[in-house]
Image (cartoon, grey):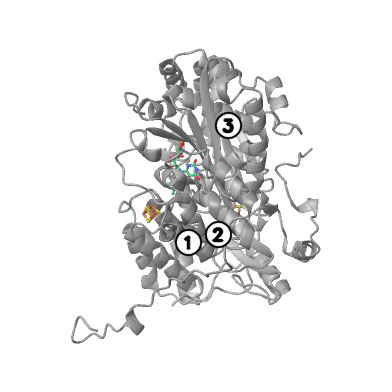
Amino acid sequence: MSFHPLMAYDRARFQKSERKIADEGPPFVFTPERRAKLDDILTKYPPDKKRSAVLAALYLVQEQVGYVTAGGMRHVAGILDLAPAEVEDVATYYVMFFKEPVGKHVVQVCRTLSCALMGAERVTETLSEKLGIKVGETDASGTFTLLEFECLGACDRAPVIMVNNAQWYECVRPEDVGRLVDDLTASKRDPAFSGCHLKVEA
Amino acid sequence: MEPVLTRYIREPNSYTLAFFLKHEGYEGLRKALAMAPTDVIETVKTSGLRGRGGAGFPTGMKWQFVLTDTPLPKYICCNADESEPGTFKDHLLMERNPHLMFEGCLIGCWAIGAKVAYIYIRGEFFHVQEILEAELAKAYAQGYVGKNILGTGFDCDIVIHRGAGAYEAGEETALIESLEGKRAQPRIKPPFPAVAGLYNCPSAVNNVETLCNLPSIFINGPQWFAGLGPEKNGGPKLFCVSGHVKKPGVFEATMHTTLRELIFEHAGGMRDGRHIKAVIPGGSSVPMLLPHELDIPASFDAVAKAGSMLGSAGIIVMDDTTCMVWAARNLLHFYKHESCGKCTPCREGCDWLYKVLTRIEAGEGELRDIDLLVSVGNNIVGKTLCAFGDAAATPALTTVKHFRPEFEAHVSEGRCTVPADWRATGMPVAAH
Ligand SMILES: Cc1cc2nc3c(=O)[nH]c(=O)nc-3n(C[C@H](O)[C@H](O)[C@H](O)COP(=O)(O)O)c2cc1C
Ligand code: SF4
Ligand code: FES
């Protein structure tokens, strides 16, 4: 089809939407515990404002499946009286929801100015070498995903790494990266890396 | 100055309710609840407290604007989204002194007639949220939050709401949208939140540090608070210093303190043998200052007079090993990534600024690209829905203004002329 005789507005060339169709994932219903948790969260908002719990519900989907699936989003839509597209609209906006399968450990390195000034680029480079993957990729065994993140709000502890949206490692130097990866692989946690604010300094 | 907000943060149990109660905890609330809400607002106005979230707007005035003659419920939204690059003060406050924020939320609710305060905390602060939730449960159990607070008959709930990774959620109307379960995209103002905010009800959005300042105003009096700093810039202030300094961290001081003192005395000065090249005084969104401009008080008004802004008081220090094209590109990556996409100049402009900066940094730029940066930047400033647009253009515009020869050197040499040993080994691949 063409709107202009000299311009071929054909689909293939001019309608390259970057939108990815959400991954269907396994059939989804919340486990009874997660459903109870969501029902509890819903009590914190006015009864006719169930939509406010959509982020919390998506976190629960992600906790259950590992990422946010189309099936999970439809389920959430059903509970919150929304259209599935409204849930997808939200899920695709926020960076902490994974829209496709990710590794067991999602390593997120802060790349913004204060961290970069303290060598975050080198940390990412070293991680990338050690794991054999580029930023944005998951390794073949599905153990690690490497991501870059924007300022995590702990710039005095630069460079900062967050794992799986929750676990923080601070003041990481390129030479620490090997130890960090080994710890994660062995599901250990080296206290030397983390909780700097919490740890009371002399 | 004797610290007010961070006085006890190094004590191991400073975050617990028991510790807080031993150190005048919830005393400010007790005093505020003994006053009429209008007097509470008057007191805050007298203290001159200005918002610590970025704009420095007087808090008392903000509360006064909240509609009262309406049957609708009212809300306090505590802005704990802290995502401005270079800012980490609310992080520390919440981690080490969560009850101070709860107390501030309750005082705010009493002042504007709200029965619920929503604390919107950024999703990444999950470790902080766990502390907040545990401490909030204790405060509920002991009657400091919930029904009949302190036996005064005042009922007020506090709800912690987790965001999910979006810088733009820090903008007040975007925060409200996000709380309502939508994309964090700002609304067109007016109406302002004070008239139609959360769930279209009158609301006030206040930063964590702003709310944390309230208890001391009621304990020590508004005159004490106003007297702590220069005129119209009263009270204690938290400054975050990061980047190329020896001892980065959060420092509490009055706004009499100069930027130079903050960098050289509080933060330990520059690393050995290095000197300052540029300083961003208020989070990545504000114009840079040069080394000779640092002898000014770090107050809202003095920094504004120097052509920048105190913003969130996130002071980022760059030494002479920093390539300014690289720094601008780094920040534009942030802004291009975080633009909510609602207005075209910001959404497209950030992307273009990033692409052109990448091209110059990779040594593939042309001289006219430098003017292109300025032209794209100027076509974003003032043409967008929220302040993000101006903020995003700032790193590109101010680096070109102050460091144009560096841009020209990239073009003429075809490579980065200031490569530092702390940067990635590879050059950026130019985006075509
Ligand atoms: C793009 C953008 C991001 C913002 N991010 C934050 C933030 O992370 N935290 C914050 O407290 N205020 C942030 N603000 C400022 C808020 O819009 C608002 O002014 C502030 O929360 C008001 O609180 P205050 O009066 O106590 O300062 C941001 C503003 C803009 C335009
Ligand atoms: S200026 Fe940018 S961030 Fe703000 S509303 Fe427009 S597109 Fe969104
Ligand atoms: S820049 Fe990395 S935490 Fe702020």
Please tell me which residue is depicted at 62% across the width and 22% down the height of the picture. B143
Please tell me which residue is depicted at 37% across the width and 37% down the height of the picture. B193
Relative height, residue B211 to residue B403 (above, below): above
Q: Earlier in the sequence, mark 1 or mark 2?
A: 1
Does residue B20 appear to the left or right of B365 in the view shown?
A: right
- Residue A117 visible (yes or no): no
Dot 2: element: loop
Please tell me which residue is depicted at 35% across the width and 66% down the height of the picture. B371
* Label 3 lies in ligand 1 vicinity (Cβ under 8 Å): no
Dot 1: element: loop
Whether residues under marks 1 and 2 lie with C-beta atoms below 8 angstroms apart, the answer is: yes
Whether residues under marks 3 and 1 lie with C-beta atoms below 8 angstroms apart, the answer is: no
Distance in Å between CA atoms under marks 3 and 1: 31 Å
Residue A67 drawn at (x, y percent): 59, 63
Marks 3, 2 in one chain = no
Residue located beneath label 1 in the image: A92
Does residue B229 appear to the left or right of A166 in the view shown?
A: left
Distance in Å between CA atoms under marks 1 and 2: 7 Å
Mark 2 residue type? Phe
* Label 1 lies in ligand 2 vicinity (Cβ under 8 Å): no
- Quarter the C terminus of chain A occupies: top right
Distance in Å between CA atoms under marks 3 and 2: 28 Å
Which of the numbered marks, if any, corresponds to residue B101? 3
Chain of residue at mark 1: A
Residue located beneath label 2 in the image: A97
**Closer to the camera, B205 or B292?**
B205
Mark 3 residue type? Met
**Residue found at the very far top of the displayed protein:** B34
